[in-house]
C-alpha cells in the first residue's frame, strides 16, 4: 500500500460509517457521538460478551431483556446466579454467563462499579480476553486499541491480499489491522470495520462495487477477493453418545437437575443423564418403569456432535429421586433451558401427549 493510503482508507471508511452505521441497541450512533453522547461501558461490555460466536439477530432480544432486568453492572453483580443463567439460555457457550457474573462482581468489588478505561485494565477482569478488552477500550473509551474479530480478519485479509490461511494468519492480520487503526475515533473505526465485514465485505459474494475502500483493496485488484481469507481444513468432528432421563410425576412436576458449575452447559438446568462419550451409561435417577422414546436427539457443540437417547417415565407422587428435584408445572419454563435440553423436552413431549 502506497504512503498515505492507510490514512485515506481510514477517512473513507469513517465517512461511509457516518452514513451507513448499523443501528444497534448498545451502540451510540455516529451523529450522537459527534454531538457528545458517550457510550455506556456496561452496555458495550455486555454486548461484546453476548456477541462472541453469536449473531447480532440472536443477541438483540437477550440484550433488551438483560438491560431491562439488570440496567447496570451493580444490578447484574447482585443478581442470583440461577436467574442470570436462565436469562442466558439460547445464547450458548454458557461459560460466558458464568464469566459475565464474575466480571460484574469484580467491577463492583474492586473498581467501585466502574470499568477500567484501558485494554490492559480490562484484561485483568475475569472472562475478558484480548479481543473483548480491545473492543471495550476502543468503543467505550476511545483507546486506539486494535480490534480484530472475524469480520475484521476478513476485511484486512482482502485489503492486503494475505495468502496465509487462517488461523495461522491471525498474528499477521492483527499487525496489519493495527496499521489501519487511527488515533482519532478509534471506536468508530473498529465498529466501521465490523459493519463493513458484516454488510458488504461478506464471506461469500462480497459487494465490492458498494465498498467505500475498494480502491485500496489489493485482493479486489487481483480478482481474488471472494476467495480470501483462505482457511486451513478443519478436522472432522467426533460424535459422542449420551442418555437423558425425563420423568413426569402424576401432578405434572418434571424432574430436573442443575448441572455442575464447570464444563459444557455448566450451571444450567437440564434433565438427569449420562456423561457423553463412546459408551454412555448412567443409572436412572429414580426407580420407575422407564421406556425409551423412539429416535434420538442430535446437537452439535463446537468440538463434537452429540446424539442422545431419551428415556421417559411417569411416576407416582412421593419418593425422593437420587438426582435432581421435581419442578411443579407452574414453575417449569422450557425457555430457561439450554437449547440441547429444550430439544430433549420436545422429543419427549410427543410421547407424553400420546399417553
Image: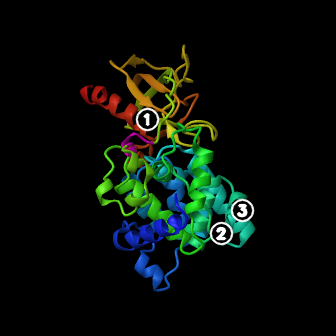
Point 44% across, 31% down: residue: 300
Gap in angstroms between the C-alphas marked 1 and 3: 36 Å
Point 55% across, 62% down: residue: 180
**Which label belongs to residue 120?**
3
Residue designated by label 2 = 115
Based on the picture, tell me whether residue 226 belongs to the magenta stretch: yes
Quadrant where the C terminus lies? top left
The quadrant in which residue 312 appears is top left
Residue designated by label 1 = 340
Q: Is residue 79 visible?
A: no
Q: How packed is label 1: few (under 14 Cα within 10 Å), some, or many (20 or more)?
A: many
Gap in angstroms between the C-alphas marked 2 and 3: 12 Å
Q: Earlier in the sequence, mark 1 or mark 3?
A: 3
Stretch in magenta: 224-228
User: What percent of the width, then of the height, locates residue 209?
Assistant: 29, 57
Q: Outermost residue toward the bottom?
A: 35
Left or right? Give the position of 171 relative to 294: right
Q: Earlier in the sequence, mark 2 or mark 3?
A: 2
User: What percent of the width, then of the height, locates residue 123?
Assistant: 69, 58
Amino acid at each position: 500500500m502506497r504512503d498515505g493510503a492507510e490514512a485515506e482508507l481510514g477517512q473513507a471508511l469513517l465517512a461511509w460509517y457516518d452514513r451507513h452505521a448499523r443501528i444497534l441497541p448498545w451502540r451510540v450512533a455516529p451523529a450522537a457521538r459527534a454531538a457528545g453522547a458517550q457510550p455506556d461501558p456496561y452496555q458495550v461490555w455486555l454486548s461484546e460478551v453476548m456477541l462472541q460466536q453469536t449473531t447480532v439477530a440472536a443477541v438483540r432480544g437477550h440484550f433488551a431483556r438483560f438491560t431491562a432486568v439488570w440496567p447496570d453492572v451493580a444490578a447484574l453483580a447482585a443478581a442470583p446466579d440461577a436467574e442470570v443463567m436462565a436469562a442466558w439460555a439460547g445464547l450458548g457457550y454458557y461459560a460466558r454467563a458464568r464469566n459475565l457474573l464474575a466480571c460484574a462482581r469484580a467491577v463492583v468489588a474492586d473498581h467501585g462499579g466502574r470499568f477500567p478505561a484501558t485494554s490492559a485494565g480490562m484484561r485483568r477482569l475475569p472472562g475478558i480476553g484480548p479481543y473483548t478488552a480491545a473492543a471495550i477500550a476502543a468503543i467505550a473509551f476511545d483507546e486506539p486499541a486494535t480490534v480484530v474479530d472475524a469480520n475484521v480478519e476478513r476485511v484486512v485479509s482482502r485489503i492486503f491480499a494475505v495468502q496465509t490461511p487462517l488461523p495461522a494468519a491471525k498474528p499477521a492480520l492483527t499487525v496489519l489491522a493495527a496499521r489501519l487503526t487511527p488515533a482519532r475515533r478509534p471506536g468508530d473505526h473498529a465498529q466501521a470495520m465490523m459493519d463493513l465485514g458484516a454488510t458488504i465485505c461478506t464471506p461469500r459474494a462480497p459487494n465490492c462495487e458498494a465498498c467505500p475502500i475498494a480502491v485500496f483493496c489489493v485482493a479486489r485488484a487481483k480478482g481474488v477477493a471472494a476467495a480470501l481469507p483462505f482457511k486451513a481444513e478443519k478436522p472432522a468432528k467426533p460424535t459422542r453418545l449420551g442418555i437423558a432421563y425425563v420423568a413426569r410425576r402424576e401432578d405434572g412436576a418434571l424432574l430436573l437437575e442443575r448441572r455442575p458449575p464447570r464444563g459444557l452447559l455448566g450451571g444450567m438446568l437440564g434433565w438427569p443423564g449420562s456423561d457423553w462419550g463412546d459408551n454412555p451409561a448412567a443409572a436412572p435417577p429414580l426407580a420407575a418403569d422407564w421406556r425409551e422414546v423412539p429416535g434420538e436427539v442430535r446437537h452439535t457443540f463446537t468440538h463434537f456432535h452429540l446424539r442422545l437417547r431419551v428415556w421417559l417415565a411417569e411416576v407416582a407422587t412421593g419418593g425422593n429421586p437420587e438426582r435432581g428435584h421435581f419442578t411443579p408445572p407452574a414453575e417449569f419454563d422450557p425457555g430457561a433451558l439450554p437449547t440441547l435440553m429444550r430439544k430433549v423436552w420436545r422429543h419427549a413431549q410427543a410421547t407424553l401427549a400420546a399417553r
